[in-house]
Image: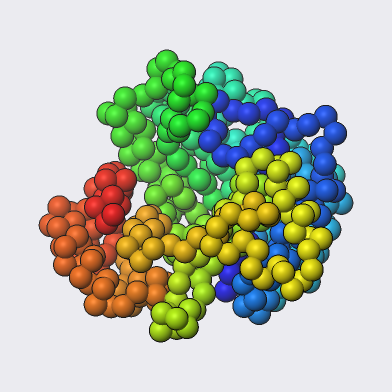
Amino acid sequence: MIALYIHIPWCIKKCAYCDFNSHRLPTSPPFARYTDALINDLKHQYSLFPHLKNSTISSIFIGGGTPSLYPPKEMHRLLQFVFSSFQCADEGIEVTVEANPGAIDSQYFSAYAEAGVNRLSIGVQSFNDCLLKQLGRIHCSDDNYQAVELAHQTGFDRINLDLMYALPQQTLAVALADLQAAVSCETEHLSYYQLTLEENTGFYRRPPQGIPDDDLTYKIANQGEKFLTEEGFISYEVSAWAREDNAQCQHNINYWNFGDYIGIGAGAHGKISIKKEEVGNRLVCMRTQHRNSPLSYMQGIEKISKMPASLLENVGKQGKCVSGMLVTEVLEQEILFEYMLNRLRLNRPFSIAECQRMTGLSRIYIEDKVVIPVAKKMIEKNDITNTYQTTHLGKIFLNDLIWEFH
């Protein structure tokens, strides 16, 4: 099983807190050219990793940027190529598109559903107009409600709302009002996460006034967790809440389980496991990364699409290439850290056998590097349980906990 991430890099406006690879939408967006590049990107990765052609795809996530700006014609063309290129999971494939309440068209939603999209992730961020303005969002709270209503009207029963807390000038009462508003939208899934000042963002360069201190942030998170629990939501990951197990985001669960995924599009990353005969047929983790610039990305993919098939196999292996995609092997000493970086976010235990299966490392190596020197100490500190599950305390200090495994 493998997942597919597709990056649509354009936004109407860049938000001051955003550190994703997003770019202002040009006057004449090259949507058709970009779709061609995405398709050829996938073909190129087939040539690099031939086993992908026989993989079963479990989920597709179309993120950005603002994917809800993408024309239905191009969305349909792209997804039809993907569906014709992969086997789909027997239980059905989850296809998610991110949407911005300020960039939504009713005809787009209907057309997306016809193209195969069956889940929407709507970035409301807040239901407070003053906070939305401070964040630099292009929508207001009324747009949030209208976007959710439109999604329901066009047949989407799988809807996620992205909501942030610890916003500038936000009080506990305002934060809880945001959660109440989100729950009133009758969504089945919430992504509830703390605002952080990431490097290379406007907020990092010019921090806004009134960001809640640690004590208030803890109160907001704690009271928010209590409220969502009382409303029937279950926390299955540190920032993800679902009413039922079948409402959980399968694509993100694949990330947190350290599963494989293909990344296509400007700035997209991927993780692909392959078996190497030269190291005893052991599973090896490969990372892929594309250029951030949409124009450079398209130019690079166009260049390799004109190459003879016989040359494509080595283009991109272990270093920068004409396609602009960097392919690197994750070093053995880094794999455990990457596994823990993802896996400890889930609110369920993991086993040594699971870790061994997902990383390709030996049981002895894992025990020597994790169980004996680190896990025992974390159990004594009550950060994880003796079944290797993050505790409530561990979730509060998750970054510090994860770093212990580095």
| Residue sitting at x 29%, y 62% | 389
| Residue sitting at x 45%, y 59% | 256
Along the viewing direction, whichever of 236 and 74 lies nearer the viewer: 74
* Up/down of 295 relative to 282, above or below: above
| Residue sitting at x 35%, y 74% | 361
Percent from the top left, x then y, of residue 296? 70, 43
Percent from the top left, x then y, of residue 351? 31, 72
Q: Is residue 289 visible?
A: yes
The C terminus appears in which quarter of the rendering? Answer: bottom left
Colour setting: rainbow
* Up/down of 285 relative to 219, above or below: below
Q: Quadrant of residue 360?
A: bottom left
Percent from the top left, x then y, of residue 371? 20, 67
Q: Quadrant of residue 57?
A: bottom right
The N terminus appears in which quarter of the rendering? Answer: bottom right
* Up/down of 90 relative to 317, above or below: below
| Residue sitting at x 47%, y 64% | 329
Q: On the picture, is 237 further left or further right than 89?
A: left
In the image as oriented, which residue stretches furthest toward the top? 209
Q: On the picture, is 60 further left or further right than 384?
A: right
Figure disc tally = 0
Percent from the top left, x then y, of residue 127? 57, 29
Q: On the picture, is 281 further left or further right than 76?
A: left
Along the viewing direction, whichever of 151 and 268 lies nearer the viewer: 268
Q: Is residue 146 visible?
A: no
